Amino acid sequence: MEWKRSAFDWNQARAFLVTAEEGSLSAAARALGLTQPTLSRQVAGLEEALGVVLFERTSRALLLTQSGVELLAHFRMMGDAASSISLAATGQSEAVTGHVLISATNLMATYFLPPVLKNLRTTAPDLQIEIIASNELSDLRRREADIAIRHSRPKDETLFAKRLRDTRAHLFASKEYLDEVGRPKSLADLETLTFVGFDQPEQRLGLMASRDVNLTTANFNFSTSSATLTLELVRQGFGIGILPIEIGTAYPELENPTSAFEPISIETWLVAHRELKTNLRIRVVFDVLAEGIG
């Protein structure tokens, strides 16, 4: 296989890398902000330049060929190198202006961030702040976000993490719901009631069992990955949910159905790439978030 240096096209390489990671042309096109025909032409151009077929196109899926599998690791290293160059260049900026991308869970973004962002607006009014409100972790190394607020410590040693104040989550239900079904007198009584929330209930049953509440998936008539929707379902009497204590106690229509349930500890971490920590605008946002949330 021979690939002349003059033939190298990073756009083609990136098109292949993102398509392989996303698993489809349509998903990769969305991730890169391209049209699907444009992305398809870039992948085809790379295949022509390399003289190999990278994907096996079927009616149901886009599968990597053996050549594609062998080359993917090399292209991932190229992607990481490109990200490092971008990070290093961004880290040289000393102006408190420009764009900063923050990722946080939808509950954190909705209920905890706005008061902090008011202070940030006063501190650095020329910044443009974009917020990703999602429970999916953003890849900071690939610049999916500049700063992330997470509920677990990152394992990647290239990331800078600061632990903020911890909080606790408890059971909450609407008074209307508890008036209807009766207030539980013991943890065992919870097992007859309806719960809402939990992205995948079957993965959370062990957590409840560790607190002597033995539930099954039948207890969850309404499930969602959205914590803000969970809150609204609980408020409207669909059942019991687990909410941060600061959130649950903020609504007078909610109450803790039983004090016997052991609260769940929640860590909060502020995370950024180490090189980005040397960037003034990133550092300003990081410090304001650390002070406001911590």
Image: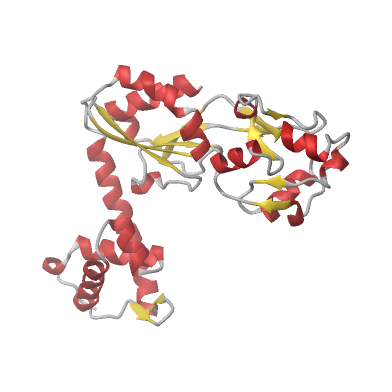
The picture quadrant where one finds residue 10 is: bottom left
Left or right side of 28 for 228:
right
Looking at the image, residue 24 lies above or below residue 196: below
Residue in front for this viewpoint, 195 or 18: 195
Q: Residue at x 20, y 78 (%)?
A: 48
Residue in front for this viewpoint, 59 or 140: 59
Looking at the image, residue 86 lies above or below residue 252: below
Left or right side of 192 for 231:
left
Q: Quadrant of the N terminus?
A: bottom left
Left or right side of 123 for 59:
right
The picture quadrant where one finds residue 12 is: bottom left
Residue in front for this viewpoint, 35 or 219: 219
Residue 287 in view of the camera: no
Q: Position of residue 214 (x, y in %)?
A: 82, 48
Looking at the image, residue 31 lies above or below residue 139: below
Q: Position of residue 86 (x, y in %)?
A: 25, 44
Q: Position of residue 171 (x, y in %)?
A: 72, 35
Q: Position of residue 189 (x, y in %)?
A: 86, 41
